[in-house]
Amino acid sequence: MNSKKMNVGMLGYAFMGKVHSNGYRQMPRFFFPPPAVPVLKCICGRKEEKVKMAMEMLGWEEYTTDWQDLVRRDDIDIFDNSGPNNIHKEPVIAAAEAGKHILCEKPLAMNEDDARDMATAVKKAGVKAMVGFNYRRVPAIMLARKLIEDGYIGKVYHYRATYLQDWIMDPEFPLVWRLKKDSAGSGPHGDLNAHILDLSLMLVGEISKVCGMTETFIKERPVVGASGDLGSAKADGSKMAPVTVEDAAIFMAKFKNGALGTFEATRFAKGRRNFNRIEINGSKGSIVFNLERMNELQFYSEEDPKFAQGFRTINVTEGGGVHPYTDKWWPAGHIIGYEHTFTHEIYELMRAISEDTDISPNFEDGVYNNRVLDKVLESVEKKTWISI
Ligand SMILES: NC(=O)c1ccc[n+]([C@@H]2O[C@H](COP(=O)([O-])OP(=O)(O)OC[C@H]3O[C@@H](n4cnc5c(N)ncnc54)[C@H](O)[C@@H]3O)[C@@H](O)[C@H]2O)c1
C-alpha cells in the first residue's frame, strides 16, 4: 500500500474522542486502499491519568495535557477537535495558523462571530477544514438527497424534523458542561437542532427567516467538579446552581425556496434516547428518515400505480455502487450503525486532503449553521420572526 501516512492530534477523549478514534482506526481497513492512512499520534486531555488511560484504550501513540503544544507540533498533520463547544475556537485557529488540516466537532462555535473567525483562519491558512456533522454520511440520508435532487418527490413543501432525547429529565442530574451557557453556548438547540439544521441545508437549502421558542424546565441542578464526561458525572447533592441553557428549543422556518420547516430539539421527551426523525413532503412524494432505523428510508411516490401507492421501506444497504459507502462494509441487508457514519466522515476528510478537493460540510456551512442558531435565539428574545 502506497498511501501517505498523516499524523493526527486530537483534543478530547470521551464520547466523540472515542468515536473519532474508532473511525481513524477502521477507515484504512475498510476503505482500502485508503486515500491516506491516519496515524493516531497524540491525544490531549486535561488530566494526565485519564488521558494516559485513553491513549492506551483508544490506540494512540502519545498523550499530552496541553493542546497548545499539540497544535504547534511539526509532526501533526491533522488537528481533531472533539472537545466541548467553548474550546473549539482557540485551538482550531491556532492549529490552522500552524498549517494543520482540521476536523472540528459541531456546532462549529459558540456563536456566528466565533465561527466566522474560525472560517477566516482556515481560509487564510489554506488548510482543509470539516465540521463534524456526521449524519450527512448516513447512506439513507444520502439517498434522500439523491431522491430530492433527481426530482422524485417534486417541489419540496415541508421539512419536519424532530431530535428528541431524555437524558436530563431527573432533576438530580448534575450541571455538566452541556447545561452551562459558558461551555455549551446553548442546550439542545446547538446540540441537536444544529444537526437537523445541517441536514436541512443539505436536503432543502438555505433558510430565509425563523421564529422560535425555548424553555428551561429545571432551573437549577447539583453542581459537579471539572468532569464534563457525558453520563459519568456524579451529583454531590451539596450545592445547586442555575441551569443557563434551554432544555427544549423549537423553531419554525421559511426556506428560500418557499418550503416550510419545523425543528424541535429537546432533552425532555420521556422514552426517546436519540430519536432523530425527518419527514420531507413534496409535490410528488414524501421521504421519512429515522435514525433509530438508520439503514432504512421510507419513500412515497405518486408515480406508483394507484393500487400500490403507500410508503415503501428501502433497505439502504445495496453494494455495487447502488447505495453510497455500503459496498465497503457487509453484504446487502447486513446493517451498519452509528459509528460507521464517523468512519465515512473520516474517509471524506482524508480524501479531500489527499486529493485536494472540496470538503463537506466545510466551515462556511458551520458559519451558516451558527448564524441560523443565533437568529433563532434572537427571535426567542425579541418574540418575533427574524430574517437570516
Ligand atoms: N457529531 C455528533 O453526533 C456529536 C455527538 C456528541 C457530541 N458532539 C460534539 O462533540 C464535542 C464534544 O462532545 P462530547 O460529547 O464528546 O463531550 P465529552 O464531555 O464526552 O468529552 C469532552 C472531552 O473534552 C475534554 N476537554 C474538555 N476541556 C478540555 C481542555 N481545555 N483541554 C483538553 N481537553 C479538554 C474532556 O476531558 C473530554 O475528554 C461537542 O462539541 C459536542 O457538541 C458531536
Image: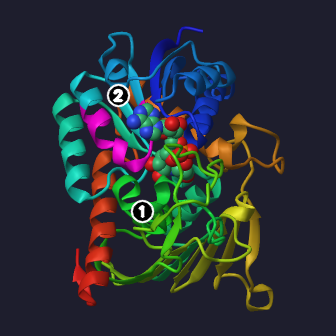
Q: Which mark is residue 388?
A: none
Q: Report the disc number at residue 101.
A: 2
Asked if residue 274 is among those painted magenta in the image, a careful observer would answer no
Disc ID at residue 190: 1
**Mark 1 C-beta closer than 8 Å to ligand 1:** yes
N-terminal-most mark, 1 or 2: 2
Look at the numbered disc 2 and give the secondary structure of its residue.
strand
In this view of the protein, which residue sits in the foreground, 321 or 204? 204
Task: Indicate the position of residue 180 as horizontal and vertical percent values.
Answer: 42, 60
Q: Residue at x 31, y 35 (%)?
A: 92
Q: Position of residue 210 (x, y in %)?
A: 31, 81
Decide: is 8 above or below 346.
above
State the residue at coordinates (61%, 33%): 23
Residue at figure coordinates x 60%, y 43% from the top left = 15
- Circle 2 Cα neighbour tier, 10 Å, few/some/many (<14 / 14–19 / ≥20): many
Q: For the residues marked 1 and 2, what is the alpha-carbon distance in whole angstroms? A: 24 Å
